[in-house]
Amino acid sequence: MAGAAARLHKLFEGHRLTPTQRRIAHCMVRRADDAPFLSSVELAELAGVSQPSVTRFAVALGFDGYPALRRHLREAPGDGGAEADADATANAYQQAALAEIENLRLLAAQLADPAPVAEAARVLAASRPLPVLGLRAASAQARGFAYFAAKVHPDVRLLDEGGTMLADRIDAAARAGAAALLCFALPRHPREVLDALAQARALGLRVVMVADSAFAPVARPEDLLLPAAVGTGLVFDTACAPMLLGRVLLEAMCDELPQAQARLEEFDARAAERGLFLP
């Protein structure tokens, strides 16, 4: 992630933004290099919102108005030093790897406060069953999480396919007693995810979301949102940080599940009996 985008993410962290404000923030991150020079009218047009919404967004961030926000962005220190020079000489593949390293650094800084992950883990560990949603690009993250979570949680239900059956499966999970739903939300965000989450919320499920940013278009203010940036330097996005955040969330869930260690030991014993893995 470029330094300008990283600074914007840091600026937006910790603020409870409305869906409209998250849309503005997401637009600014995508246009990070241009953001300090955009007028409020230009930013409103790019984000597809009204000009007063941009003003309210700046105030929500703690500024007197949009001019103060723009002045803050212009005065922010630029990138420099040997690391920036090294990045400039790297080839496209190296730059993609370096961008993912930066994403992981941002995630490490975010995890300095473990409270959001701990809260999400408590919510998910208590849900019986636990539906795990991830469609299209996010299906791999959901499947990986569900695979490992099933070793310590008694009832994990993977929702990695859309279509007419998705609504039935969410409804079935709620009827079976689910209290929460974990969603991996990555670009490009399928409309089906938005619809599925709306249904889950209407059924009373608490949504925990691992998303590519704090401004994911499928998120709502009441969700427990855990952001982890994706890499965009290659033809297809890379998702090292969301994958790691999913594993961190699993680690925290194990602390909330009293039988987690016993279940793992039981699985290992059965795997050994069956010769499941190579020695």
Image: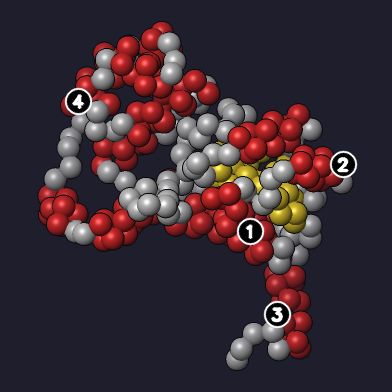
Q: Secondary structure at mark 2?
A: helix
* Mark 4 and mark 2 residues within 8 Å of each other at the beta carbon: no
Q: Is residue 270 left or right of residue 216?
A: right
What residue is drawn where x is 50% and y is 41%? 188
Q: CA distance from mark 1 to mark 4?
A: 42 Å
> Looking at the image, is mark 3 or mark 2 earlier in the sequence?
2
Q: CA distance from mark 3 to mark 4?
A: 56 Å
Compared with residue 165, is residue 39 higher up or lower down, i.e. above or below? above
Q: Which residue is mark 1?
A: 143
Q: Is residue 160 left or right of residue 184?
A: right
Residue 178 in view in this figure: no
Q: Is residue 87 left or right of residue 48?
A: left
Q: Which residue is mark 4?
A: 74
Instruction: Tally the numbered discs.
Output: 4
Crowd tier of the residue under label 2, counting other residues whose Cα lies within 10 Å: few below 14, some 14–19, many 20 or above: few
* Mark 1 and mark 2 residues within 8 Å of each other at the beta carbon: no
Q: Secondary structure at mark 3?
A: helix
Q: Which residue is mark 2?
A: 175
Q: Which residue is mark 3?
A: 268
Image spot of residue 146 (x, y percent) = 67, 59
> Looking at the image, is mark 1 or mark 3 earlier in the sequence?
1
* Mark 3 and mark 2 residues within 8 Å of each other at the beta carbon: no
